[in-house]
Image: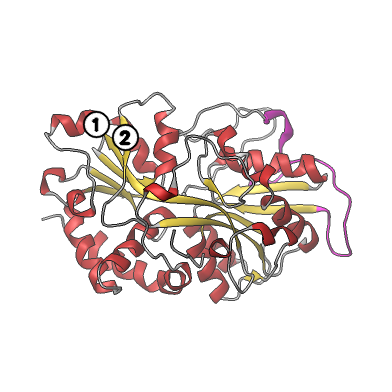
Amino acid sequence: MTTPHRTSPRPIRVHRPSGSEPYRRPRLRAALVLTGAIALTATGCARTAGETGAATAAGDSGKVTVACGATEEWCAAMSAAFTAKTGVKSDFVRLSSGEALARIQAGRANTEFDVWHGGPSDAYAAAAEQGLLEKYVSPNAAAIPAKYKDPAGNWTGVYVGVLGFCDNTEILAEKGVKPPESWADLADPALRQNVGMAHPSTSGTAYTALWTQVVLNGGTPDGALTYMRRLHPNILQYSKSGAAPAQQAARGEVGVGIVFSHDCVATQEQGFPHLKVTFPAEGTGYEVGGVAVIKGAHNPVSAKKYVDFALTPAAQEIGPTVKSYQVPTHPDAKRSDKVVDLSTVKLVDYDSSAAGKAKSELTKLFDAEVARAPKA
């Protein structure tokens, strides 16, 4: 395992008034065990767990609002469990990492969030570079390995997700193509318009794929963009959500989706046994999903309580109960047998701090030089 310094971009969910059936992401339709613990805020823009929570300090209302970067089910389960544990009221808004960063940037003068939880830590590194995060080293962070947290204390890792290929074995068999086992295989012309990938400006998953190409191709944007131009004719479309390509593969719209492997496993469990996960032999990137206190948080005491909770084994064991199979960062957290064994996958030396600093410029180059190019 290399040392990072650091899932899926997913759309904002508009939550309906209390009493109506809440929106369920099409990729995960499993009912939440904690349904009864979730209420909705009066604004309709975030879910709320718990209706009480006394003020914990001057200026802190005993409430926390979270920009949440994992699945909606995971966000809801975490929110409910935090409130059940602490009595602190908890709201969340489901956002992709690109959307979360943009919302935090836009609201820096009067932030709407107290905590950012989930999504690749290179986005957290970009936020820290812009002064958008409040340094906080939780007492519980001592148990988290150094490779999963920012040495400056801007963020701490709560899970690890590995980038891979989600293969529809039936579609690939029809085309006479084997499931890809390398980035070179993925660029094979036989897969023309049969690969699903999100856009790296909105998707943390896709940005992980883009930065992986930087690492594998000389450490420069030029090398990464050269490969992406080769791959471009094979991309059906650049989706907004990093998890969407797994659904595209499941439905047979593409033969392969570039996703974090846990998203493919979760999609398999929805009744798509013909999906298979493969990993590129040259090496693959990974995410360290983070948690951080937002600079200027209106409820800083409650925000720190949330971070403390997120770093406990109990919190990190919630994921598999809602089909989120990331690798927990806490050594004492129990691991599902559906979680990828990191020792079996070749990982690149993914420096999330460098990736975060390059994010804005590199995604602009990708959009201009790759995504907008005709597919010759």
Q: Residue furthest front?
A: 343
- Choose the circle earlier in sequence order: 2 or 1: 1
Work out how far the residue at label 2 is from the one at label 1, CA to CA, in angstroms. Answer: 7 Å
Instruction: Answer whether residue 50 is magenta in the image.
Output: yes
Position in image of residue 146 (x %, y %): 58, 65
Quadrant hosting residue 42: top right
Position in image of residue 313 (x %, y %): 67, 46
In the rendered structure, are the residues bearing label 2 and label 1 in contact, judged by CB atoms less than 8 Å apart? yes
Amino acid type at image mark 1: Thr
Q: Which mark is residue 276?
A: 2
Q: Residues within 10 Å of mark 1 (few under 14, many from 20)?
A: many
Quadrant hosting residue 341: top left
* Image vertical order of residue 20 relative to residue 84, above or below: above
Position in image of residue 27 (x %, y %): 44, 34
| Residue depicted at 67% across the width and 53% down the height | 311
- The quarter of the image holding the N terminus is bottom left
Q: Residue furthest top?
A: 271
- Please indicate whether residue 38 sits to the left or right of residue 249 in the image: right
Amino acid type at image mark 2: Lys
Front residue of this view, candidates 212 and 89:
212
Q: Which portion, as a residue range, is magenta?
A: 34-62
| Residue depicted at 49% across the width and 36% down the height | 25
- Please indicate whether residue 346 sits to the left or right of residue 145 in the image: left
Q: Which residue is mark 1?
A: 169
Number of marks in picture: 2
Predominant SS of the magenta segment? loop
